[in-house]
Amino acid sequence: MNKNDNKDEIFLKEFMNKLFNTIIYNTNEFKENQAECLINSFKIINDKLRRFNDINDIVKLIQNHKNHDIWFSSLNGLFHQCGYMDYYYIDYNKCLNLYLLAIKNEEILKMIDLNIREENEEEEEEEEYDDDDGDNDDDNFEDYILQLKNVIIGKYLLSLFYYKEFIINKPLSIKKLDSNYDLIYNLTLQHLKDFEECRKKNSLGNNNNNNYYDNIYFFLLCVKFGLKNIDEIEKNIFDYYKNLVNKKNNILAKLILSIFYTLRIIMDKKEKMKTFEWVLNWAEEGNSFAQNNLASYYQYGIGIDKDEKKAFEWYLKSAKEGNNPIAQNNLACCYQYGIGIDKDEKEAFKWYSKSSDAGNFDAQNNLAFCYKNGIGTNMNVLKALRLFIISAKEGNSNAQNNLASCYQYGIGALKDEKRAFEWYLKSSESGNFEAQNNLGICYQYGIGTSINNKKAVEYYFLSAKNNNSFAQNNLAFCYQYGIGIELNEKKALEWYTKSAEAGNLDAQNNLDYCYKEGIGKDNNKYNYNYNLNVNSMFDKPFVYFNNPDPEYLSFYLH
């Protein structure tokens, strides 16, 4: 190998390791909206790649490398999927084959592992006679780890590939969905074994690297959540990890179980208390992810009495000592809203900025909200718009909804109702119930699209089912006057009641009117004190207008 070839190989290995750490680290964005997490992950990877000016040269180096099939096949598949091979035509079969090739190389790794064991046995016998093989051993071990990473990345990207290209972009039959699910489920189970093997082999690894390996599982669990319902998760994955905890006291399995409890999938009190103890122990050992989880346990009273002061302390520890961008965003929220600490908007702005700089999409959205409203900083709608755009383009549904509002009302940008509609639609398709309500408004009033009352009702209903009080009020209004749906005053009354009980002032007024006029009731019962009674139940008013108004942003841009 000549000097240039050697330099190229060193560069490729460094590139592989850095990208590996980057894409795994970013899976810390573990949210209840798993589909959003998946799409965000792909866009993060793509964005990281585009920062390299010589990306096409890297592609050529990989393709020309003699070991590209066993070292870099997963990256090769990624480059195909991102459009670096052909921007106008992406060969998805090629992507799939390259990811599968990375996984098939697992058999080769088993042979290498066998050879390593045999060589170690021989070295023990011949060690005193051989003083020059140390460097070769290190090289062989490094190559082994590189190949193992290629297998792990291949499984990671294959899971993402199936979700993004087959679940999101192309409608699947139930039968095909099930077959894809089985493959990904099997990969998830196998992945734990890969992780444990890699941890044993990687004796030079540090705690941070181990965290990267850990996060692969959280991503695969996202895939799992996105493809099957909660019953399937409890039956399969949950039982599998629970078994690992009971029989092997596996630390990683404990943390994964803690995620189930954090998402309130499993509600058994004893189990939650046990999981709290696991997370507490790991947090005290310095794991920033566990520290952030522990803080959320204290904040919401999961497995322990609610204690916002302790929640703040653990968020601070994770954010400061662990430099965890998720915890930094959560810490900022504590400062902004006075959770476990006195309100301090300047501190909130500072921590949102740190988390945003680390690429946290929630923080970018929240930081934009600060700029838009002058919270902890001077008002700057241009910076707000720029941050909304960055976060929205990466797939953050809240930012997409907020960006749409900016375009709708001309905040930081020229008023553009068509663009507003497009971004509301994107956010809505990701399951954002606030955007679904806003999209309903667009259809009802012809904002950026043609008036379509039937679609307006469909989106109001989607949002109302997710307990959005504004959508509940709008849906009730449609039932009351037969807009886009058959007139039904009883259902109108039901939805006004739900919205009013959630604190929606418009719904309270509308409900009062219904009682006064006997709408939806068998008698003309008039409850003129209803508003007063309901309002006394709520500390914070909810602002909403049937006719869209810029003030609407004061509630939703957040």
Image: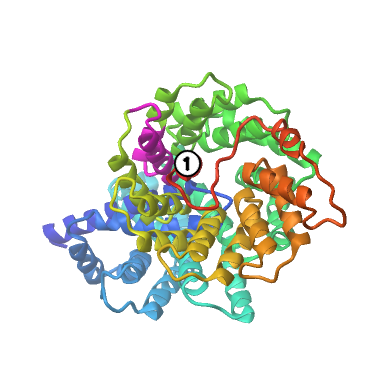
Q: Would you place residue 224 above or below residue 412 in this image?
A: below
The one of 389 and 136 positioned closer to us in this rendering: 389
Q: Residue 417: x, y in percent?
A: 37, 60
What segment is highlighted magenta in the picture? Answer: 352-377
Q: Residue 421: x, y in percent?
A: 42, 62
Q: Would you place residue 364 above or below residue 233 in this image?
A: above
- On whether residue 526 falls in the magenta region, the answer is no
The one of 525 and 50 positioned closer to us in this rendering: 525
Q: How many marks?
A: 1
Q: Would you place residue 503 above or below residue 349 in this image?
A: below
- Quarter-wise, where is residue 519 in the image? bottom right
What amino acid is found at the position of numbered circle 1 in the picture? His
Q: Which residue is situated farthest in the right direction here? A: 523
Going by the image, does 125 lie left or right of 276? left
Q: Residue at x 44, y 28 (%)?
A: 348
Going by the image, does 56 lie left or right of 341? left
Q: Residue 102: x, y in percent?
A: 42, 68
Residue 261: in sight, yes or no? no
> Tag 1, which secondary structure?
loop
Residue 74: in sight, yes or no? yes
The one of 557 and 163 positioned closer to us in this rendering: 557
- On whether residue 366 falls in the magenta region, the answer is yes
Q: Residue at x 64, y 52 (%)?
A: 473
Label 1: few (<14), some or many (≥20) within 10 Å?
Answer: some
Q: Name the residue that disc number 1 marks.
A: 558
Q: Residue 445: x, y in percent?
A: 49, 62
